[in-house]
Image: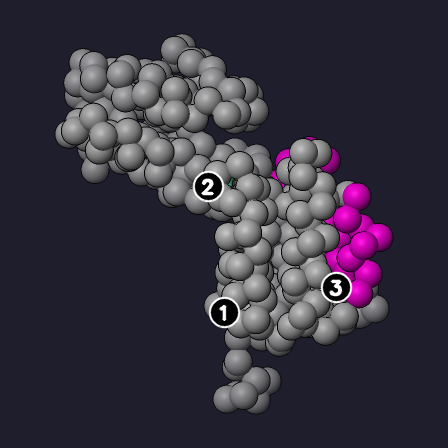
Amino acid sequence: MQLPAEGKGSLAIVGIVPGSPDQMTARALKVIAGAEIVIGNDTYLDQLKEFLTGKTIVRSSMGKEVERAKTAIKMAQRRRVAIISGGDAGVYGMAGIVLEVLEHENDAMPVEIVPGVTAANAAASRIGSPLSGDFAVISLSDLLTPLDVIEKRLDAVFSAGIPVVLYNPRSRGRPHNFLAAMTIARKYLDEKTPIGIVKNAFREGEKITITTLGEIEQWSDGVDMHTTVIIGGLESRIWRRGKDVKGIITPRGYHRKCLY
Ligand code: SAH
């Protein structure tokens, strides 16, 4: 897709990865380079500082996503606007709400969604290969989804025995959701099930912990909103190099077919 000509408005919703700009796609960098206006919250704008010289910056804050979407759409009538979203814009990000507002306003402006590395992939890459086959993603935030619905979903995905990735795992406002989720996991999984706790993946302050379901209580204080938690499935195991614990492997099944 070509970038639109000068003076013609367009809107791009750009996933800018969860951590350092090193992980951004070539397309995301190109679209941001071509934008006249970049809209996002402080954390993400600061992350991108080096790419924003000479552009109009519109700062928005957490919880103001609907207003941000409306502002972006308004500005994109005449200007090239990039609205940035952490990780992938389509995974608990800005893409959905922007498309809903566009639909509601019956606006046919050109819109491009630029995919990015989501926290699940970023976190997984720091601890080996825990998500080699089927896996599920659940957010523990009950701001937009009722808690009883989240619990039903947790029960369903843990009962499937596949690895489960938890986003928004523990905030100050709802510190108990995380251990409540672990109690649901215990209905179906062994205490030895490996768990990876990845805080600030690819960012300053990155911290990685590999533990087990049996020992998760002692690590739960360190789980926060900058953390992604990966709970292994029935086939997941600890990944070692020599004696060192490096992470988690979930075999995809090659061992059942091939010798290696
Ligand atoms: N759109 C984003 C997710 C937004 S929800 C994406 O695709 O990644 C916010 C949650 O993502 C956080 O609470 C945390 O669970 C996870 N997350 C985002 N960045 C992260 C990082 N650098 N390290 C670990 N987890 C991260």
Asked if labels 3 and 1 touch by Cβ distance under 8 angstroms, the answer is no
Q: Which mark is residue 213?
A: 3
Q: In which quadrant is the N terminus drawn? A: top left
Question: Dot 2: within a 10 Å radius of its alpha carbon, few (fewer than 14), some, or many (20 or more) residues?
Answer: some
Is 242 placed left or right of 153 in the picture? right
Question: Residue 130: percent from the left, percent from the top?
Answer: 60, 64
Q: Of the residues shown, which amino acid type is indicated by label 2?
A: Tyr
Q: Of the residues shown, which amino acid type is indicated by label 3?
A: Leu
The residue tagged with tag 1: helix, strand or loop? Answer: loop
Is 124 placed left or right of 186 in the picture? left
Residue designated by label 1: 133
Q: CA distance from mark 1 to mark 3?
A: 20 Å
Q: Which mark is residue 92?
A: 2
Magenta-highlighted residues: 199-221
Q: Of the residues shown, which amino acid type is indicated by label 1?
A: Gly
Q: Is residue 133 visible?
A: yes
Q: Residue at left 72%, top 73%?
A: 190
Asked if labels 2 and 1 touch by Cβ distance under 8 angstroms, the answer is no
State the image quarter where residue 236 is shown. bottom right
* Residue 131 position (above or below residue 149): below
Q: Residue at left 76%, top 71%?
A: 192
User: Mark 2 near ligand 1 (CB under 8 Å)?
Assistant: yes
Q: Earlier in the sequence, mark 3 or mark 2?
A: 2
Which label sits in the foreground, 1 or 2?
2
Q: Residue at left 16%, top 29%?
A: 106
Nearer to us in this view, 196 or 206: 196
Question: Residue 246: percent from the left, percent from the top?
Answer: 73, 61
Is 191 placed left or right of 16 in the picture? right
